[in-house]
Amino acid sequence: MIPKLTDTEVIAWFSNPDYQRRGIGLLITGGSRHERSAIANTILRQREEAGQSCLSLTPFEVVAAHHFGQTNRLRREDVVLINDLGELSQAEQVAVDVIKPVFDVAWTMEYILQQRYGHGRTTLVTTEHDLSELETMFSERLAYQLRYMGFSIRLDGEDG
């Protein structure tokens, strides 16, 4: 049986300096959008208070930043939070459809995750989707990166 952790235990575990030095990530799935965001934003706030540079982006903003030459910034920030992977507003979807021939979304996300991992930078990802759904939506490689470049937690609550 998988032990259940409280939000406080997850935050405490992720805030451990030994864990932080490994430069790995955290995938938060399930639960409500509010619950996922609350945990991720608490971790982000703690890291900012500890003097680390932090950035919170949507998947669309990650792709746009890469497209507009901000890859080095995405790579060098101490902590990057990618909120709601797999969710795009209608306007974002239209924009992605326009730039897709230039930059594939799955490839861009894979590249950014690999760069951050290779440089020992922490990445938090929240999503309502499980890994098999992300594999279908993006790519097998992206799902593999999310599975093996850190650890994941699945929250029990439901969106509502």
Image: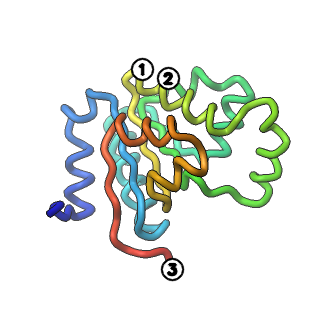
Q: CA distance from mark 2 to mark 1?
A: 5 Å
| Quarter location, residue 90 | bottom right
Direction from residue 158 to residue 89 in the image, left or right: right
Counting residues from the start of the chain, the first of labels 3 and 2 encountered is 2
Q: Please name the residue shown 35% across and 36% down the image.
A: 148
Q: Is residue 124 above or below residue 78?
A: below
- Please, what is the three-letter code of the amino acid marked with disc 3? Gly
Q: Is residue 158 above or below residue 82?
A: below
- Please, what is the three-letter code of the amino acid marked with disc 2? Gln
Name the residue carrying label 1: 118
SS for dot 2: helix
Name the residue carrying label 2: 115
How many circles with numbers are drawn on the protein?
3
Q: Position of residue 1 (x, y in %)?
A: 14, 63
- 123 or 93, which is in the foreground? 93
Name the residue carrying label 3: 160
Crowd around label 3: few <14 · some 14–19 · many ≥20 (10 Å): few
Q: CA distance from mark 3 to mark 2?
A: 35 Å
Q: Position of residue 124 (x, y in %)?
A: 42, 44
Direction from residue 21 to residue 57 in the image, left or right: right
Q: Please name the residue shown 52% across and 24% down the image.
A: 75
Crowd around label 2: few <14 · some 14–19 · many ≥20 (10 Å): some
- 119 or 93, which is in the foreground? 93
Q: Please name the residue shown 45% across and 32% down the image.
A: 53
- Please, what is the three-letter code of the amino acid marked with disc 1? Gly
SS for dot 1: helix
Crowd around label 1: few <14 · some 14–19 · many ≥20 (10 Å): few
Direction from residue 115 to residue 62 in the image, left or right: right
Q: Position of residue 93 (x, y in %)?
A: 76, 53
Q: CA distance from mark 1 to mark 3?
A: 37 Å
- 147 or 14, which is in the foreground? 147
Q: Position of residue 73 (x, y in %)?
A: 57, 25
